[in-house]
Amino acid sequence: MEERDWLILKTLYEQKNITKTAKILYISQPTLTARIKQIEESLGTKLLYRGNKGITFTETGEYTVKFAEKILGELQDFRETITNMQEDVAGTLRIAAPSILARYFLPKLLGKFQDMYPKAKFDVQVAQSSDVISLTGALNVHFGFVRNKFDWPEYERILLATNYVCAVAAKPFVLSDLPHMVRVDYYTDQYYQNLLDKWWYEIFEEPPIIGTRVSNLDLCKEMVFNGLGYGLLPSILIEEYPQLHSVPLVHKDGSRVKRNTWLIYKKELLDLKLPKVFLEFVIDSDFDSFQRNH
């Protein structure tokens, strides 16, 4: 079997769908279906079944997928080691980050790094901070950017920046108005949700009035901009909308509600040249300067 075959099985197992897998791998659906049949024939066993609810793997198929993940991981390690033996800073840097950091910081940061090291390439995964930590811990990525402080005994970490959380609305208001205003809420990671809830009940007794709930921060911002209610949003998200009215969230002791941005990684990855050079670049840079619109 070729490397492409292992990748087909791994992706198919993750997606549980022929059409999605074909799209991700940039091959036609008939070609993918035919190749799966060829793989099964070469192994002499059935690996999966197609049903109304998607793909179901057999016990043999499950084992084959685990073997595929091992093979692909070893090939990736092999390529990184070979690249590391070369004099040039080259190869693919694997990064995971929440959507806000990926959108507002990574394009300029990675662009500047590539200007300095043109042979560097990037593989960026967007995930919630808790998932970024898992990806980093499993060595599926070289570096993780996260917005919260977790218990990280096994990770190296660097504080990159501090941002603040604001209440934002289309019309002027003060914080004491919030219990009587309609909120546009959004789904977020549990740490950030706990941060907002803790602040709210520290300041107010009654629960917030949730008028609209959306899937992410960007959509929340658009809803607020169009007058559907107020939102509790990171300050970096609203700088491109100066017409919105924002008030920083403040604790009873007068301190502002903040979110720190961290870079996390496993120390053993610094044996590789590309991650080591990237880390030095980030440490020597002003992270806030990479924010979009700066």
Image (cartoon, grey):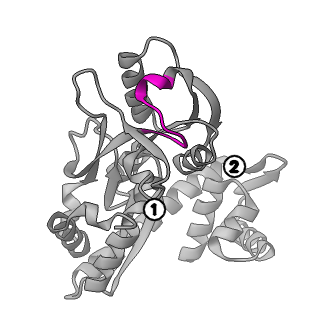
Residue at 57% in and 68% down = 7
Q: Is residue 177 magenta?
A: yes
Work out whether mark 2 precedes mark 1 in sequence or the reverse, and give the earlier one: 2
Residue 1 in sight: no
Q: Amino acid at mark 2?
A: Thr
Residue 226 percent across, percent down from the top left: 63, 47
Residue at 30% in and 78% down = 112
Secondary structure, mark 2, is loop
Q: Nearer the viewer, residue 238 or 121?
A: 238
Q: Residue furthest right?
A: 52
Circles 2 and 1, Cβ within 8 Å, touching? The answer is no
285 sits left or right of 192 in the view: left
Work out which quarter of the rendered image holds the N terminus and state it.
Answer: bottom right
Mark 2 vs mark 1: in front: 1
Q: Residue furthest front?
A: 172
Q: Which residue is mark 2?
A: 58
13 sits left or right of 275 in the view: right
Work out which quarter of the rendered image holds the C terminus and state it.
Answer: bottom left
Q: Amino acid at mark 1?
A: Arg
Residue at 27% in and 66% down = 289
Q: Residues within 10 Å of mark 2 (few under 14, many from 20)?
A: some
Residue 104 percent across, percent down from the top left: 41, 61
Task: Count how many numbered circles sit on residues in the image.
Answer: 2
118 sits left or right of 43 in the view: left
Q: Is residue 174 magenta?
A: yes
130 sits left or right of 263 in the view: right
Secondary structure, mark 1, is helix
Q: Which residue is mark 1?
A: 103
Residue 186 percent across, percent down from the top left: 56, 38
Q: Which residues are magenta?
A: 167-178
Residue 290 in sight: yes
